[in-house]
Amino acid sequence: MYAVLETGGKQYRVSAGDTLEIERLAVEAGQPVTFDRVLLVNADGKSTVGSPTVASATVVADVVAHKRGQKLIAFKMKRRKGYHRTVGHRQELTVVKITEIKA
C-alpha cells in the first residue's frame, strides 16, 4: 500500500516505514503529525485518485528530527562591471517516518 501526499509544495510517494526529508514543520521532534492532503492511495492494486485530494485518506507520521540541508551556492556576476556576489542558502528540513496510511 502506498500514497502520494503533498506538503511544502512538493509531492512524495510514501508507504509505511519510509523516512522522508520534507520542508520544516512546526512540530516538536518525537510528536506525531497527520497529512490530510493525500492525492492518491493505492491499496492492493486498487487506486483511488482524488480531485484534488482523497476525502477520507490521511497519512500519519512521526517527526524524527529537524535539520538543515546542504549548502547551495548562488553566484551573481555582471561582466566588465566589477560586480560579483556570492550567496549561500541552507534549507530547513524535517525528517519524518511514515507509520500508517489510513484510506
Image (cartoon, rainbow, N blue to C red):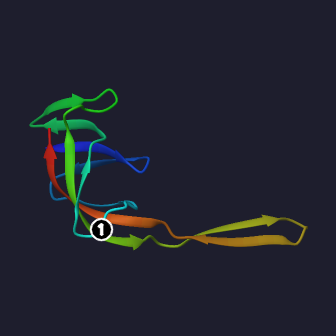
Q: What residue would you read off at disc 1?
A: 28
Q: Percent position (x, y) of residue 80? A: 90, 67
10 over 22 or under it: above or below: above
Q: Which residue lies furthest to the right in this view?
A: 80
Label 1 crowding class (10 Å Cα cut-off): few <14, some 14-19, many 20+?
A: some
- Viewer-closest of 1 and 98: 98
Image coordinates for residue 39, horizontal then vertical, percent: 30, 36
Q: Which residue lies furthest to the left in this view?
A: 44
Quarter location, residue 47:
top left
In the displayed structure, does residue 76 sit left or right of residue 83?
left
Q: In which quarter of the image is residue 52?
A: top left
Q: In which quarter of the image is the N terminus?
A: top left
- For the residue pair 92 and 32, the one nearer the viewer reads as 32
Residue at x 45%, y 67% (from the top left corner): 92
- Residue 4 rendering spot, x and y as whole percentages: 28, 42
In the rendered view, tell whether residue 27 sits above or below residue 71. above
* Dot 1 amino acid type: Glu
Q: Position of residue 18 (x, y in %)?
A: 21, 58
Please tell me which residue is depicted at 32% across the width and 63% down the height of the picture. Answer: 27
Query: With 6 as the anchor, is 72 left or right in this view?
Result: right
Rendered residue at 38%/72% (across/down): 67
The residue at the far top in this view is 51
